[in-house]
């Protein structure tokens, strides 16, 4: 039996040897020669395809990995060196909250006192407070909180702020960050108050809750290369990452 090692597949699906010979039909020992010939060619082609895939697969995987590592459109790509100059990790500060008492009415606003303390050996910038950071137009407010009930459900309200300014006058990044941050030297602290309202989500039911407050720093991918360089020129780094704090309270229906 003749075995053909090289063949091509035509547009109409026919398999033809590379040397141009035509496939003919002939009776050979009672079998259809054309069918056997086509099967031989198909097996040969499958061998070639398996051989090609075996060597091409690693290159295909490497190409897909390279495509996956390309920058995504719309996301700022930050230089690691500039990020290190402009930011410090969140564990450079201590963030704590305190309450005047641990029992409140279900319609009573709860003032949560917080303290940000610089526990590092160098100076750093921390967020000044809720309303000021909400007006920076760089991400959400950097001090924010909510409630968690004893079933693990979380309740957090939206936010709004009145941001003053002169129409047509745009502040530089340095001006905005100076207004929305506090420079803390080693050992210094900054105190503030965040108001939480248990009437969110239609009003929280009486019972035990955990108040959760988060101090959020900034992210490197929120800024362009030029903006990161501008932040680095401000002399001290900014806080990066998050620091949570919590306290337990009980909500009660006020006595009439």
Image (cartoon, helix red, strand yellow):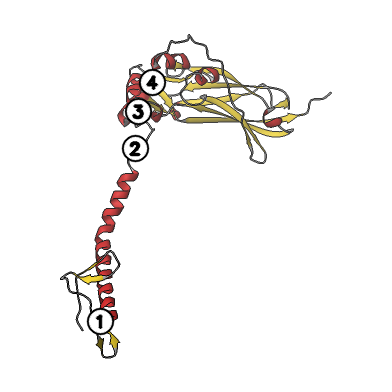
Whichever of labels 2 and 4 marks the residue nearer the N terminus, that label is 2
Look at the image and tell me in which quarter the N terminus lies.
Answer: bottom left
Does 26 sit left or right of 123 as displayed?
left
| Labelled pair 2, 4 in contact (Cβ < 8 Å) | no
* Residue contact between numbered discs 4 and 3, judged by CB atoms under 8 Å: no
Q: Earlier in the sequence, mark 4 or mark 3?
A: 3
Q: Is residue 162 above or below residue 88?
A: above
Q: Where is residue 203 shown, x and y percent of the image?
A: 71, 30
| Nearer to the camera, 229 or 212 | 229
Q: Residue at x 28, y 73 (%)?
A: 42
Q: Nearer the viewer, mark 3 or mark 1?
A: 1
Q: Between residues 151 and 33, which one lies in front from this camera angle?
A: 33
Crowd rating for badge 4 (residues with CA inside 10 Å; few <14, some 14–19, many 20+): few
Q: Which dot, 1 or 2, sits closer to the camera?
A: 1
Residue position for label 1: 25
Residue 160 at x, y percent in the picture:
58, 21
* Residue for badge 4: 122
Cα–Cα gap, marks 3 and 1: 74 Å
**Residue bearing the label numbered 3:** 83
* Sooner in the amino-acid sequence: mark 1 or mark 4: 1
Q: Secondary structure at mark 3?
A: helix
- Residue 223, located in which quarter of the rendered image? top left
Which residue does the numbered mark 2 point to in the structure image? Answer: 71
Q: Which residue is rendered at x = 29% and y = 54% of the image?
A: 60
| CA separation in Å, label 1 and label 2 | 58 Å
In this rendering, which labeled residue sits more in front, label 4 or label 3? 3
Residue 251 in view (yes/no): yes
Residue 5 is labelled as none
Image quadrant assignment for residue 6:
bottom left
């Amino acid at each position: 039996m003749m075995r053909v090692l090289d063949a091509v597949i035509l547009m109409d699906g026919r398999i033809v040897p590379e040397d141009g010979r035509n496939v003919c039909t002939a009776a050979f020992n009672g079998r259809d020669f054309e069918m056997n010939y086509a099967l031989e060619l198909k097996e040969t082609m499958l061998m070639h395809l398996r051989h090609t895939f075996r060597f091409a697969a690693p290159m295909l995987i490497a190409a897909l990995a390279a495509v996956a590592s390309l920058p995504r459109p719309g996301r700022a790509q930050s230089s690691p060196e500039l990020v290190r100059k402009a930011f410090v990790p969140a564990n450079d500060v201590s963030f704590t909250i305190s309450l005047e008492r641990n029992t409140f009415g279900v319609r009573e606003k709860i003032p949560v006192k917080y303290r940000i303390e610089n526990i590092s050996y160098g100076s750093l910038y921390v967020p000044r407070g809720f309303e000021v950071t909400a007006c920076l137009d760089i991400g959400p407010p950097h001090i924010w909180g909510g409630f968690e009930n004893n079933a693990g459900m979380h309740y957090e309200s939206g936010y709004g702020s009145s941001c003053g300014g002169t129409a047509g006058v745009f502040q530089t990044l340095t001006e905005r960050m100076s207004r929305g941050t506090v420079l803390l030297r080693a050992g210094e602290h900054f105190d503030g108050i965040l108001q939480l309202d248990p009437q969110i989500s239609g009003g929280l039911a009486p019972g035990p809750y955990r108040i959760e407050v988060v101090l959020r720093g900034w992210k490197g991918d929120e800024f362009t290369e030029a903006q990161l360089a501008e932040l680095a020129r401000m002399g001290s780094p900014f806080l990066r990452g998050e620091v949570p704090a919590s306290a337990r309270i009980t909500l009660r229906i006020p006595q009439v």
